[in-house]
Amino acid sequence: MDNLTENNPITSTDIPPCKNVSATPLDTPELEARVEQNIEATVDFSEVDIDPDLSAPPHAVTPAGILPMDPAPIEGNLRKATISVPDAIEDAGGFTLFGRRIKSLMYSTDVAVIRNSNADAVFAVYPFTAQPSITQALLTAAECPVFVGVGGGTTTGKRSVQLAAVSEMQGVAGVIVNSPASPEMVEHIVHVVDIPVVATVVRADDAHAKVRAGAKILNIAAGKNTPEVLRELRRSYPNLPLIAPGGKTPESIQATIAAGANAIIWTPPSAQMMQQDMMARYREQENAGVHEEPSIDPISAGDINPIDGVGSDIPFPDDVIAHLAQASQRRRERRNAFFSRHK
């Protein structure tokens, strides 16, 4: 290095050329990797201690102290004897209506029963022409959404459409049309209201035209054939809410849910039946000299379909209604003319 001076710089000719060096892989023996087809792994948790903080119920720290996150149900001394829907209905998936989950619909127009029930909704149909005053009474008593019938059998045509519009203005959650209602009637109601139309069907073939007309919910009223019709409609409409009566026993309710029902229509005991049962227990306690606090054990759900027994009478044609209205108008005109002449 001492000979390297500015007068003797190193040039490229002084560096010998590099030989081409090729990299060769190392000679390594091939290893065979083999994995068994069936691998079974088991873990024995019999001697594993679970942290009590993970298994104990969750609690919350509040100014009043440590309280459980799942508090005890709140009941009053006078309203604790409510009518509870069968526990089997909890297995239903339900459907969402305006942000509310509905699994059980109570078939009743008894305001006392409706007021003291824990059903998710009220299914109010009756074998008379729907009246806004009845609807208003149901809405006043209920603490949950109310579905009301607007005809389809005895009442039909323009009157049913008008009843649906008035019912929506009163605040109902949906309107129900009977099985004889035509798809045209369903379509007219759908164009007038912004709440769902529940179409009742007794056969699967009856449902398709009403669904095309705009029905948002189907009520299956096929009697003993209800599970079969449910399964057929579920195959055709996997996302359409289907409701149906569940029968008298938990087994029949579970079978109806398994067939495809999203929600169950439950028939509660009437107030008269419950009062009769209560008075019988009062007499037994009086005879035995026992004065226990009374309680109510509701009867299991009935398999009576809400509108299966409502027949379809011959409706009044629109021209007949118009003729009667014109006749009434002519009578009023003659009466007014008579009084004007004798003033």
Image: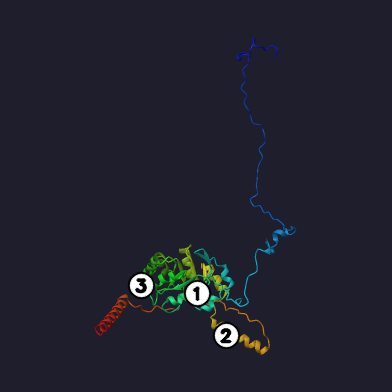
Q: Dot 3, how many residues are within 10 Å of its Cα: few (below 14), some (14-19), or many (20+)?
A: few
Q: Of discs 2 and 1, which sits in the foreground?
A: 1
Query: Residue tagged by mark 3?
Result: 158
Q: Name the side, left or right, on which 29 lies relative to 92.
A: right
* Secondary structure under the numbered disc 3 in the rendered image: helix
Give the mark, 2 or 3, whose residue is nearer the N terminus: 3
246, 326: nearer the viewer: 326
199, 209: nearer the viewer: 199
* Secondary structure under the numbered disc 2 in the rendered image: helix
Query: Residue tagged by mark 1?
Result: 140
Picture disc at residue 276:
2
C-alpha span from label 2 to label 3: 42 Å
Q: Of discs 1 and 3, which sits in the foreground?
A: 1
Give the mark, 1 or 3, whose residue is nearer the N terminus: 1
- Residue 312 in picture, x, y percent from top left: 39, 78
Position above or below: 67 against 9: below
Amino acid type of the residue tagged 2 in the rendering: Gln
